[in-house]
Image (cartoon, rainbow, N blue to C red):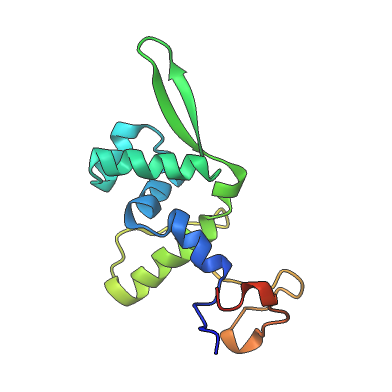
Amino acid sequence: MDSVGPRECSVARTLEIVGEKWSVLTLREVFSGVRRFDRIQANTGAPRDVLTRRLRTLIAHGVLERRQYSERPPRYEYRLTSAGKELLPVLLTLQQWGDRHLYGDEPPLTYEHTCRETFEALLVCASCREPVRPRDLQILHEHPEHVGR
């Protein structure tokens, strides 16, 4: 009998890139407009060597890009790529979950949308615009070459 390994999926592959605490907190900072190493490090509390490794990984996988903003001395900042910007809903829903389940009535940070209402993230279907619930989803096709890898 063949041994069956864990199912290969995009969630697992994505977590290899952004699924570590310092990576997520780095993305939080860059989304908030903090782009320079020292400020990212101060705001996240990440050890410098760990932050350096996480930034390299995020750059290597096309989530962030490094741009020089000073020649003497050479200084760089980190900016989101289009792929990185697509992670905003993930960060907002993680924050929202933490607000509800860890902070309750006093979340440490709230957002106001341009409509002037307090922002709340909501996942909807792109076609019908209905909210998405787990019971509304079913696997349409699972490629055999990815099962049990």
Query: Image quadrant of residue 144?
Result: bottom right
The N terminus is located in which quarter? bottom right
Residue 118 in sight in this render: no
> Going 68% across and 78% down the picture, which residue do you hit?
142
> Going 66% across and 72% down the picture, which residue do you hit?
145
Query: Image quadrant of residue 76?
Result: top left
**x and y percentages locating residue 71 in the rendered image:** 42, 12
> Going 35% across and 12% down the picture, which residue do you hit?
73
**x and y percentages locating residue 137 in the rendered image:** 65, 84
> Going 47% across and 21% down the picture, which residue do you hit?
68
Residue at the extreme front of the image, as rendered: 1
The C terminus is located in which quarter? bottom right
Tell me if residue 21 comes above or below residue 46 in the rendering: below
Tell me if residue 56 comes above or below residue 17 in the rendering: above
Tell me if residue 131 comes above or below residue 44 in the rendering: below
Q: Nearer the viewer, residue 68 or 127?
A: 68
Tell me if residue 59 comes above or below residue 145 in the rendering: above
How many numbered discs, if any?
A: 0
Q: Nearer the viewer, residue 147 or 64?
A: 147
Residue at the extreme top of the image, as rendered: 72
**x and y percentages locating residue 99 in the rendered image:** 35, 69
Residue 132 in sight in this render: yes
**x and y percentages locating residue 4 in the rendered image:** 52, 83
In this image, 117 relative to 94: left or right? right
